[in-house]
Image (tube, grey):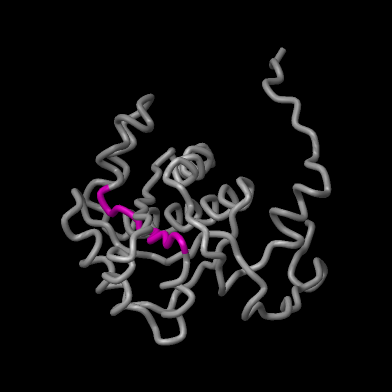
Amino acid sequence: MVEKKTDNKPLNDHALDQLFREARTFNAWEDRAVPETLIQAVYDLMKFAPTSANCSPARIIFLTSKEAKGRLKPYLGEGNVDKTMSAPCVAIIGHDLQFHEHLPKLFPHTDARAWFEGNASLIAETAFRNGTLQGAYLMLAARSLGLDYGPMSGFDQEGVSKEFFDDEAGDVRANFLCNIGYGTTDNLFERSPRFDFAEVCKVL
């Protein structure tokens, strides 16, 4: 007999609204700092969400100081400058192309590192997919702890990778940026339409 380990129940409507139904992408922010303890709490939730073979390739740099955000500014698209410079925290979500070197620690029950050695295309695909997943988990973790966010592309990925990750161990590539803080309704777009289930889904 298999022992059931969890007794999951649906979240209440308030939680579902906060995470999904009323969640928005913010472009303006309260002048209110996000403390490092809260940033760490966001990560400590995010890290438990699944990745393939627990590979955990995301590498994240949180910019909170004016000086750090100033280093990012030259690499931003023009339309992203003001909202990013005013955000209390900017997360650079990258992925490590040497993630497989950590698999003996993260996936110790088999030699998962051997699955990737010498296979650059599999490494790149796995790192990008799972690093992107972890970026999405980061946003949900932030929302669950009362923060707002504004994910975006529109920046020089190669430049940001070199500026912020070039001195890190391994080979880390920037994927996307996410402004984090306490959003305001300034410059908030109307919610865009979404597909209905039948338009994009099938049950077979």
Q: Which residues are magenta?
A: 88-98
Is residue 90 shown left or right of residue 48?
left
Residue closer to the observer: 168 or 147: 147
34, above or below 174, in the image:
above
Task: Return the x and y of residue 59 as percentages of the image width and height.
Answer: 35, 51
Residue closer to the observer: 66 or 26: 66
Q: Quadrant of the N terminus?
A: top right
Is residue 73 shown left or right of residue 41?
left
- Seen at 51% across and 60% down, the residue is 180
Find residue 119 and report its image quarter.
Answer: bottom left
- Seen at 60% across and 70% down, the residue is 26
- Seen at 80% across and 40% down, the residue is 10
- List the single residue furthest toward the left: 167
Residue 94 inside the magenta-drawn segment? yes
Task: Return the x and y of residue 86 as percentages of the image width and height.
Answer: 46, 71
Prevailing SS of the magenta stretch: strand
Find residue 67 and report its image quarter.
Answer: bottom left
Task: Return the x and y of residue 143 as percentages of the image width and height.
Answer: 62, 52
- Seen at 67% across and 21% down, the residue is 5
